[in-house]
Amino acid sequence: MERILIIDDDTELCDLLNEYLTPEGFQVDAIHDGQSGADQACMQDYDLIVLDVMLPKKNGFEVLQQLRSRISTPVVMLTARGDDVDRIVGLEMGADDYLPKPFNPRELVARIRAVLRRVKPDGSELGSLAASNRMLRVGDVKMDLSSHGVTRSDAPIELTAVEFNLLEHLLRNAGRLVSRKYLTRIVLGREMSDFDRSIDVHVSKLRKKLGPDPADMERIKTIRGVGYLYVLIPPVDDYQT
């Protein structure tokens, strides 16, 4: 049974979400202030956290910052409708997805399932991968699909679940253009809507974590108005003389 922690001071909303999530096979806990929510999330083992931005004692951004310094549990943030700043800040700080209030509880359930599918892929799918496909390498970047580990020049890089999946699809298509619509659908689990910049924020964060390649070139190129291209560069050994 997958465990969900809801951190929201709206007790009626928490009760409503509990009614929707429990029949779907989730075990739900609810905390109504930021400080207690952060403590609970770090002390207990949850599969996903639903986190509101506006909270007493400690706001959602402060909670997210505390969580990301200690745990990698996926987080879906609840933001005020139309407040793009909150959404962008949340994604930049490590949220896996967001949903503006007010929302249909069924949509939140769908978002939760989409995030969990990305974090916990079907075991049969992993089992069908050939041994050679368990490791992706482009230049000095290596990705172990079994352990969810990523290294750059053999130094580990900490990625969120969304960033890991984004990098996997970019590496698999290295040297080829990948559209924003495709990445939004495959990585975020939804169709891209007008003015949706979520995937762009995740790409920006991934760029910062990867840094430039050994030749001091940008790894992920933006093809304006279309999508992104991971530059196909030779293995790091080829840079050595």
Image: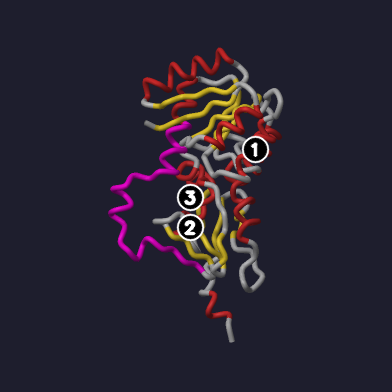
Q: Residue at x 48, y 45 (%)?
A: 187
Magenta region, main secondary structure: helix
Identify the residue at the far front of this view: 43
Label 2 Cα crowd, 10 Å radius (few <14 / some 14-19 / many 20+): some
Report the residue marked by disc 3. Answer: 165
Q: CA distance from mark 1 to mark 3?
A: 18 Å
Q: Is residue 47 above or below residue 165?
A: above
Label 3 Cα crowd, 10 Å radius (few <14 / some 14-19 / many 20+): many
| Spot occupied by residue 124 in the image (x, y as percentages of width and height) | 28, 48
Q: CA distance from mark 2 to mark 3?
A: 12 Å
Kind of residue sitting beneath label 1: Gly
| Horizontal side, residue 45 vs residue 83: left or right | left
Kind of residue sitting beneath label 3: Asn
Q: Residue at x 50, y 35 (%)?
A: 44
Q: Which residues are magenta?
A: 111-138
Question: In the rendered image, which quarter contains the C terminus?
Answer: bottom right
Question: In the rendered image, which quarter contains the N terminus?
Answer: top left
Report the residue marked by disc 2. Answer: 149
Kind of residue sitting beneath label 2: Gly
Magenta highlight on residue 112: yes
Q: Residue at x 55, y 40 (%)?
A: 96
* Mark 1–mark 3 CB contact (< 8 Å): no
Label 1 Cα crowd, 10 Å radius (few <14 / some 14-19 / many 20+): many
| Spot occupied by residue 231 in the image (x, y as percentages of width and height) | 55, 65
